[in-house]
Image (cartoon, rainbow, N blue to C red):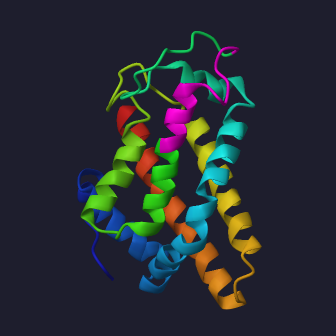
Amino acid sequence: MEHIDEQRLEQDVAYRFQYLSAFMQLSADEVEAIHSAASWLAPLVPALVDAVYTKLSQYDCTWRHFLQPQSGFQGAQPQSLAELTLEHPQIQFRKQHLGRYLERLVTAPYDSKMVAYLDMVGKIHTPEAGSKSISIPLVQLNALLGYVNDALIITIYAQKLPSAAEQLTVRAFTKLLWLQNDLINRHYTTAA
């Protein structure tokens, strides 16, 4: 039986990621499947991003969070949901961030730098990082990750990969998004 330092799980994000990866049996072959997907997934990122933002724009409880100023955005801030369209410059700016995130998932090594990045993705949706006015409810982030997971699975199936490669890739991305979900949820547990 392997000993896991439970207190360290809460304090050391790399240790936490390592433990969860081992527990879920995220294999080197699965990480390779994620990286191999870059060749066919990268060209599809703009369409995936558009689908995500279209989904987010369909609900006031998700779309309202985009009225908040985005760090680094220099343009005019939308003042109402009616003014906040999918073509608004602030939404275009945010779409670029999501696109870079998706590209990084399939290109970056899963080292300590990537683990810190995935952890920051969770943290920036709370008042702990960035704007103190940004606090996205956890239910919205869980809904979003579920939607992204489903969109990725549909995209993988559309590639008509050989059966073994398809299964490996679906399992790999599902595990990766569960890891990301944990690194989001941990910031809500500590904030509560």
Query: Against 161, is 10 above or below?
Result: above
Name the residue located 45 percent from the left edge and 19 percent from the top edge: 75
Name the residue located 24 percent from the left edge and 51 percent from the top edge: 11
How many dots with numbers?
Answer: 0
Query: Against 38, is 164 above or below?
Result: below
Q: Quadrant of the N terminus?
A: bottom left
User: 105 or 42, which lies in front?
Assistant: 42
Q: How far across and how far down the image is residue 40, in percent?
A: 60, 72
Q: How far across and how far down the image is residue 136, in percent?
A: 51, 30
Q: Residue 151 vs residue 42: left or right?
A: right
Name the residue located 67 percent from the left edge and 81 percent from the top edge: 166
Toward which corner of the image does residue 2 lie, by quadrant?
bottom left
Q: Which residues are magenta?
A: 82-96
User: 77 or 58, which lies in front?
Assistant: 77
Query: Against 98, is 176 above or below?
Result: below
Q: Residue 162 vs residue 89: left or right?
A: right
Indicate yes or no whether the magenta region holds residue 83: yes
Q: Residue 95 vs residue 156: left or right?
A: left
